[in-house]
C-alpha cells in the first residue's frame, strides 16, 4: 500500500448532506426555542397563565 493512500491524518473529511441537515436543524430548533422564550416573556413572569 502506498503511503499516500494510507495517510489521512492531514486531510479534513468532507461534510456530508446529513451532517449539514443536522447542523441546520439544530440552528432551527435553537432559534425557535429562543423566539418562544422571548414571546413568553411578553406575558409576564412565571407562570404565564396566571396573568
Image (spheres, grey):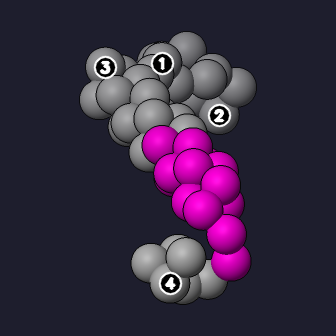
Q: From mark 3 to mark 4, how far is it between C-alphas?
A: 45 Å
Mark 3 sits on what residue? Answer: 17
Nearest to N terminus: mark 4 or mark 2: 2
**Highlighted range, magenta:** 32-45
Image point (48%, 18%), residue name = 14
Nearest to N terminus: mark 3 or mark 2: 2
Mark 4 sits on what residue? Answer: 50
Q: Is residue 1 left or right of residue 39?
A: left
- Whether the magenta-drawn stretch holds residue 11 is answered as no
> CB atoms at circles 3 and 4 under 8 Å apart?
no
Who is closer to the viewer here, 5 or 37? 37
Nearest to N terminus: mark 3 or mark 4: 3
| Image depth: mark 3 or mark 4 in front | 4
Secondary element at tag 2: loop
Q: Is residue 10 above or below residue 37?
A: above
* Residue 37 visible here: no
Image point (61%, 83%), residue name = 46
Q: Is residue 2 above or below residue 19?
A: above
Mark 2 sits on what residue? Answer: 9
Secondary element at tag 3: helix
Q: From mark 1 to mark 4, how far is it between C-alphas?
A: 51 Å
| Image depth: mark 2 or mark 1 in front | 1
| Image depth: mark 4 or mark 2 in front | 4
Mark 1 sits on what residue? Answer: 14
Q: Position of residue 11 (x, y in %)?
A: 63, 21
Nearest to N terminus: mark 2 or mark 1: 2
Q: Is residue 49 above or below residue 22?
A: below
Q: From mark 1 to mark 3, how far is it between C-alphas?
A: 10 Å
Report crowding for label 4: few under 14, some 14 to 19, many 20 or more residues within 10 A (C-alpha).
few
| Image depth: mark 1 or mark 3 in front | 3
Amino acid at each position: 500500500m502506498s503511503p499516500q493512500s494510507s495517510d489521512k491524518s492531514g486531510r479534513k473529511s468532507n461534510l456530508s448532506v446529513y451532517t449539514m441537515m443536522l447542523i441546520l436543524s439544530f440552528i432551527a430548533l435553537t432559534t425557535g426555542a429562543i423566539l418562544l422564550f422571548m414571546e413568553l416573556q411578553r406575558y409576564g413572569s412565571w407562570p404565564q397563565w396566571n396573568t
